[in-house]
Amino acid sequence: MSPPAVNNIEIGNVGTNDFRTIGIGTSGTQTKTFIAGISGVTVANGFGVIINPQGQLGSVVSSARFKTDIRPMDEASEAILALKPVT
């Protein structure tokens, strides 16, 4: 038996079997998110959220499994490795 749906906020979502969840929209129906007041706020230890000029939220995934045409830098990296950073 599933726990009852309690302590939820559901907007455009029936929230079946949700528990302590904020549900906005339905997966596959709504495809964009806009939230005012999030731009310019810095938090530590979080996941990067990108906000485009129209205010839409998203994220960037940087992983070899999502990329194509990955090649070794070979000699191109020599100039970077030759740098001598100082503080």
Image (cartoon, rainbow, N blue to C red):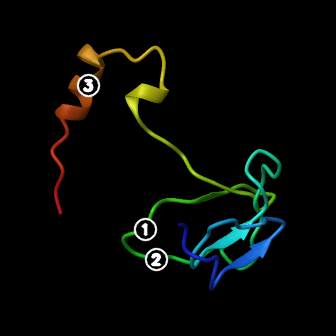
Element on which disc 2 rests: loop
In the displayed structure, 42 sits above or below 33; it is below
* Residue closest to the eye, 24 or 38: 24
Residue displayed at 72% across by 55% down: 52
**Real-space Cα separation, disc 3 to disc 2, in angstroms:** 33 Å
Residue displayed at 25% across by 28% down: 79
Inter-mark Cα distance, 1 to 3 = 30 Å
For badge 1, the amino acid type reads Gly
Query: Which quarter of the picture shows residue 33?
Result: bottom right
Residue 43 marker = 2
Residue for badge 3? 77
Position in image of residue 30 (x %, y %): 81, 52
State the image coordinates of residue 10 (x, y, percent, origin top left).
Answer: 75, 74
Mark 1 Cα shell of 10 Å, populated few (<14), some (14-19), many (≥20): few
Residue 66: give its label. Answer: none
| First in sequence: mark 1 vs mark 3 | 1
Q: Say if residue 20 shows up in the picture.
A: yes
* Residue 46, numbered label: 1
Q: Residue at x 62, y 67 (%)?
A: 17
**Which image quadrant is residue 65 in?**
top left
* SS at mark 1 in the image: loop
Q: Are marks 1 and 2 in contact (CB under 8 Å)?
A: yes
Left or right: where 44 falls relative to 8? left
Q: Residue furthest bottom?
A: 7
Label 1 vs label 3, nearer the camera: 1
Query: Could you tell which of marks 3 and 2 lies nearer the N-terminus?
Result: 2
Q: Disc 1 to disc 2, how far (Cα)?
A: 7 Å
Q: Quadrant of the C terminus?
A: bottom left
- For residue 39, say whether it is visible: no
User: What residue is drawn where x is 49% and y is 59%?
Assistant: 48
Kind of residue at badge 3: Ser
Count all numbered tags in the image, as a single digit. Answer: 3
